[in-house]
Amino acid sequence: MAGLYADEQSPLPVVKLLRNFGHDVLTVQEAGNANQKIPDEEVLDFAISNNRAVLTLNRPDFIRLYTLNSAIRA
């Protein structure tokens, strides 16, 4: 199943539902990163370094960051 990193805007009912389906979901709160105004770039870096996909409602910004990150790593 998928390893996910749920950012602060991710609805808790969605996190619970994904866990019920067997996905490994780590929330920002569980990682000790809540209420710190961590930039999206660092959220993505954390997820990548922990082999997780970001679960977010902020799709446009993370798509842009992923695209930039992929170009840099290529």
Image (cartoon, helix red, strand yellow):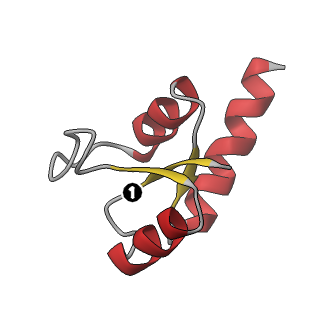
Residue name at image x 35 percent, y 43 percent: 39
| Identity of the residue furthest to the right in this view | 74
| Identity of the residue furthest to the bottom in this view | 13
Residue name at image x 31 percent, y 61 percent: 8
- Percent position of residue 40, x then y: 43, 46
| Identity of the residue furthest to the left in this view | 35
Q: Nearer the viewer, residue 16 or 71?
A: 16
| Identity of the residue furthest to the top in this view | 73
Q: Nearer the viewer, residue 31 or 18?
A: 18
- Percent position of residue 41, x then y: 47, 38
- Does residue 24 appear left or right of residue 2 in this picture? left
User: Which residue is tagged 1?
Assistant: 7
- Percent position of residue 72, x then y: 73, 22
- Does residue 25 appear left or right of residue 31 in this picture? right
- Percent position of residue 25, x then y: 46, 52
Residue type of the residue flagged with mark 1: Asp
Residue name at image x 51 percent, y 28 percent: 50
Which quadrant is home to the C terminus? top right
- Does residue 62 appear left or right of residue 40 in this picture? right
Residue name at image x 59 percent, y 54 percent: 62
Number of numbered markers: 1
Q: Nearer the viewer, residue 20 or 13?
A: 20
Above or below, 28 relative to 69: below
* Element type where label 1 sits in the image: loop
Q: Nearer the viewer, residue 74 or 55?
A: 55
Within-10-Å neighbours for mark 1: few <14, some 14–19, many 20+:
many
